[in-house]
Image (cartoon, helix red, strand yellow):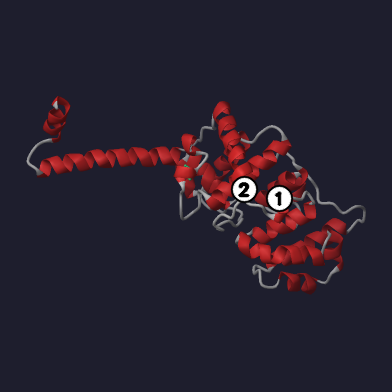
């Protein structure tokens, strides 16, 4: 992994309130494989070198994911190392007072995350044992402060389980590539995007790890909410949003040519006829 990319990434569990309005079609298996292969190859060269991408410790992965919620990567980098140095394990968090955990979180904002982490640590360490976070996304979701995205992220990034994940950035990327109408993100859209995320997920968990990181990276650096860098995007050959944009540009260019001809007093048909004959 190399290079510093614009820091526009932050995790958030996508929200929606409306109900589904349409049926989706899932990507064909050969398309899913091709997109994933291209994304993973791109990520290996362009993914940012971030500390939580070098570890598999479930607790430290969870800390990184909680910190990244609603927070830019550059900001999290200022806090992550010092937090895990002060609280290297879930036991250390559980033994601390809630105020001490919040104090170490001071400056990152959204302090409910620190409170939830402390509550989670107390729950997981309550019965003694090795106090490891579960690897199963369904079991993870039962813990305080863990939603569907975070459960998938811990299962995939810590345990290399074959687990899908859809945060706001990934939802945007999947919608643009496979079904741009889903970018509205109603409740039905989100369910459809989760199904797409499952459908394109590689079979092996370690390969899915890279695939998931690549989707996150693409949404953070290439296909952001504000900017689409389609000219350098590895998904461009399959991207429905880009194809729609190109079709619209072509239609506008044809309409523009027609308007210019009419202003000159001719007709588009006559103009095209003259061009063909020269
Ligand atoms: S081709 Fe453009 S719109 Fe499509 S995923 Fe890439 S950056 Fe986003």
- Label 2: state its secondary structure: loop
Mark 2–mark 1 Cα distance, whole angstroms, equals 10 Å
- Label 1: state its secondary structure: helix
Vertical arrangement, residue 244 with respect to residue 272, above or below? below
- Label 1 Cα crowd, 10 Å radius (few <14 / some 14-19 / many 20+): some
For the C terminus, the quadrant is top left
- Residue 212 point in image, percent of width and height: 64, 43
Q: How many marks?
A: 2
Vertical arrangement, residue 157 with respect to residue 34, above or below? below
Q: Quadrant of residue 260?
A: top left
Residue at image coords 56%, 52%: 220
Q: Quadrant of residue 242?
A: top left
Per the image, the residue denoted by label 1 is 53
Residue at image coords 50%, 48%: 223
**Residue 21 in sight:** no
The reply to whether the C-beta atoms of the residues labelled 2 and 1 are less than 8 Å apart is yes
- Residue 15 point in image, percent of width and height: 57, 54
- Label 2 Cα crowd, 10 Å radius (few <14 / some 14-19 / many 20+): many
- Residue 143 point in image, percent of width and height: 76, 55
Mark sitting earlier along the chain (2/1): 2
* Label 1 CB sits under 8 Å from any ligand 1 atom: no
Per the image, the residue denoted by label 2 is 47
Q: In front here: 86 or 168?
A: 86
**Residue 91 in sight:** yes
Residue at image coords 88%, 59%: 126
- Residue 35 point in image, percent of width and height: 56, 34
Vertical arrangement, residue 162 with respect to residue 132, above or below? above
Indicate left or right for 104 with 195 as reference: right
């Amino acid at each position: 992994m190399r290079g510093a990319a614009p820091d526009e990434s932050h995790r958030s569990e996508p929200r929606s309130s409306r109900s589904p309005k349409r049926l989706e079609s899932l990507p064909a298996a050969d398309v899913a494989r091709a997109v994933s292969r291209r994304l993973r190859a791109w990520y290996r060269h362009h993914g940012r070198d971030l500390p939580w991408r070098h570890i598999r410790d479930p607790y430290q992965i969870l800390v990184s994911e909680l910190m990244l919620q609603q927070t830019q990567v550059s900001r999290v980098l200022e806090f992550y190392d010092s937090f895990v140095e002060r609280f290297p394990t879930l036991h250390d968090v559980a033994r601390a007072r809630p105020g001490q955990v919040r104090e170490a979180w001071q400056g990152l904002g959204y302090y409910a995350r620190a409170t939830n982490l402390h509550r989670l640590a107390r729950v997981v360490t309550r019965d003694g044992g090795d106090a490891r976070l579960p690897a199963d996304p369904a079991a993870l979701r039962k813990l305080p402060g863990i939603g569907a995205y975070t459960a998938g992220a811990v299962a995939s990034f810590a345990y290399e389980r074959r687990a899908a994940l859809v945060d706001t950035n990934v939802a945007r990327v999947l919608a643009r590539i496979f079904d741009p109408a889903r970018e509205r993100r109603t409740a039905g859209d989100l369910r459809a995007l989760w199904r797409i995320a499952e459908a394109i997920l590689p079979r092996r968990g370690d390969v899915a790890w890279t695939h998931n990181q690549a989707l996150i990276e693409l949404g953070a650096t290439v296909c952001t909410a504000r900017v689409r860098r389609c000219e350098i995007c590895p998904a461009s050959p399959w991207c429905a949003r880009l194809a729609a944009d190109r079709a619209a540009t072509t239609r506008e260019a044809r309409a523009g040519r027609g308007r210019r001809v009419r202003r000159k007093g001719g007709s588009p048909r006559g103009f095209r006829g003259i061009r063909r004959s020269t």
